[in-house]
Image (tube, rainbow, N blue to C red):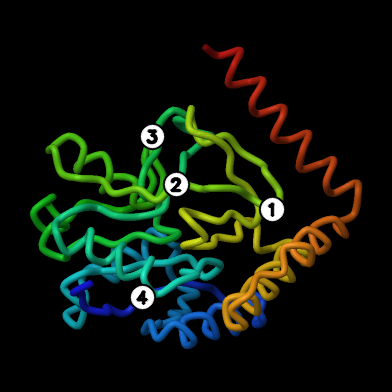
Amino acid sequence: MNTTTPTVHSYYRYNIEPRLLDAQARVFDHLGVPLVQDRNDRLDHAGWMNDLMTRDDLDDVVVVADIDAYPLKFDAYASLVAAAERGAVAGLAQTTNHKDPTKIYAAPMFIAFRKDLYRAFGSPDLGRYATGDVAQIMTDIAQARGVEVALTYPSFAVRPMWPLADYGIYGIGTFYGNHDFFHLYQARLSEAVELFCAVSDGVVAGRHDWARYLEIMSLAPIQKRRGLLSKTVHKAKMRLRSR
């Protein structure tokens, strides 16, 4: 596959667990994908992305990943970049369930698009708005203009949590594509950090320990699990009542 290897930019703040940073960096180093972990305690995620797009040293294809995400294979990353190079907005599929649970978009947990496409879209503000979350505007504009949106969908999650519109479910420890990408979600939970590190170990070793991943999440305190589940069920009921 003929494609460049642009740098991935990953935003984080002072309160991120150092083991998370190390685990992400190990995967990118193992795969040979350039990574910049950009600490910024002044700007929020959206402000950081807007600032990133003003930089003069960006690659032609801009790639952004959450600090708790990484590709699982180099070829998967190269395919994402290739889609962006041909003019698509390419990324992992997500919904903003608290705003518009029906809309699937390319989320900045792992997203790629051409710098000149962003400018052709009018250099939009990548912040949150009434019906969308950070960077969701790129999908909205692309769809309105007939530009391809190349989505990679979740295949399963170690702990299923949220609906992905009418497609399926994602959650803590979500694997995307054919074991192509991994996004943790809820990195503030200690057991989630353990899972992120374990999957990182699996990528570097070339063998995933699925039993270990399940074991890590099974050790979460039962009250915490019930609390997370009850909140998810409550939100789903409220959405159904509003229809």
Residue 232 shown left or right of residue 100 in the figure: right
Q: Amino acid at mark 1?
A: Val
Instruction: Please give the residue where the numbered disc 1 appears in the rendered image.
Output: 158
Residue 162 percent across, percent down from the top left: 61, 38
Depth check, mark 4 against mark 3: the one in front is 4
Q: Which disc is residue 130 wearing?
A: 3
Amino acid at circle 3 = Ala
* Label disc, if present, on residue 8 of the rendered structure: 4
Crowding around mark 1 (Cα neighbors within 10 Å: few <14, some 14 to 19, many 20+) is many
Mark 2, other Cα within 10 Å: few <14 / some 14–19 / many ≥20: many
> Looking at the image, which is closer to me, 189 or 173?
173
> Which residue is rendered at x = 35% and y = 59% of the image?
111
Mark 4 or mark 2, whichever is nearer to me: 2
The crowd level at tag 3 (other Cα within 10 Å; few <14, some 14-19, many 20+) is few
Per the rendering, the mark at residue 153 is 2
Q: Position of residue 231 (x, y in %)?
A: 73, 35
Instruction: Name the residue: 51% across, 73% down.
Output: 12
Q: Quadrant of residue 57?
A: bottom left
Residue at the spot 18% in from the left edge and 74% down from the top edge: 2
Q: Is residue 79 above or below residue 106?
A: below
Query: Depth check: 141 or 73 in front?
Result: 73
Q: Is residue 236 above or below residue 31?
A: above
Residue 217: x, y in percent?
79, 58
Circle nearer the N terminus (1, 3): 3
Q: CA distance from mark 4 to mark 2?
A: 20 Å
Name the mark nearer the viewer: 1 or 3. 1
Amino acid under label 2? Tyr
